[in-house]
Image (spheres, rainbow, N blue to C red):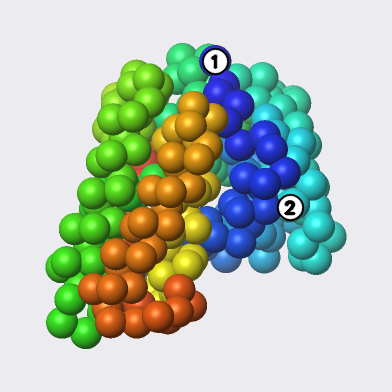
Amino acid sequence: MTCQVFVGEDISSNYQKYRFRYINISRRQSHVLAVDLGCGTGQTTRLLAPHFQEVVGIDVSETQLEQARAVLSCPDITYRKGTAEDLPFPDGSVDLITASSAAHYFDESKFMAEANRVLKPGGCIALIDFPLQKMRLHYRDCGERLTDIFHQQHEFIKYQYTFVSRLVKSENMLEDFFSAISFPDKQRAEGILEKSTTSVRKVLGSVKTSSMFQIYKGKDAQRAEELFLDTQKRLLQEMKATSPDTEIEWTLEYYCVMASKPKQ
């Protein structure tokens, strides 16, 4: 059953501002239709636009979709409310199905049945995820200590809420989906690194977009905010900086599962 975590205006706004942008794994092609599931505010959806005649982003959260529609982008992109287990497309009509940090919310068997139904022969599935527990921070000579502080926050939140089954599935980093895909032409890639620069504010803001933080905040909003502010304070003290807009580098490790439906 699809999980509805990112449904409020506040989380949707933070998702648009702070969520890490995904690497662009698509190739320039002349295909017709790409579908981005769990599209959120449309970061991955917009990456697909130059490569397809039509791109559809689907999400269970209307507030997320409103944020996506508010961004000026290619007119060939549309957004619809829906789930990965009930896709509004005819049989054999989709060239590519993507999901970025969303597949762990899907019902595997129902999603795979729908993917097999709507994909064209030779059509592809591309699922992307990344583990926050492997994210690393870099700043002068204190990067390791900053990374430890960030991971301490992550671990604390991880064990403060009861959504354990979903969390464990998420941290398998798509292994379950790789096993569930029946297409013989499939591969799982890991260790895809991306390094970029952002601010302390945005690094910590990205934590607020995680399902873990949102569920923890729902249980104890005051304590969740206190944890956020305390982590920010500890990072800045370690950096000997005063502003949360101070820039630091981060490294993310991406995991991908890709599969092609047989042409015959």
Number of other residues with Cα within 10 Å of mark 2, as a class: few under 14, some 14 to 19, many 20 or more: many
Residue holding disc 1: 1
| Residue drawn where x is 52% and y is 37% of the image | 221
Q: Nearer the viewer, residue 116 or 142?
A: 142
Quarter of the image with the N terminus in it = top right
Using the rendered view, name the quadrant where residue 92 is placed.
top right
Using the rendered view, name the quadrant where residue 11 is placed.
top right
x and y percentages locating residue 85 in the rendered image: 60, 20
Residue holding disc 2: 68
Using the rendered view, name the quadrant where residue 241 is placed.
bottom left
Residue 115 vertical placement versus 193 (above, below)? above
Hey, what amino acid is under mark 2? Answer: Ala
Res 243 seen here? yes
Is 92 on the left-hand or right-hand side of 74? Answer: left
x and y percentages locating residue 146 in the rendered image: 23, 66
x and y percentages locating residue 21 in the rendered image: 51, 62
Mark 2 or mark 1, earlier in chain: 1
Res 42 seen here? no
| Residue drawn where x is 61% and y is 54% of the image | 14
Q: Which mark is residue 195?
A: none
Q: Nearer the viewer, residue 250 or 81?
A: 250
Residue lying at the far right of the rendered structure = 75
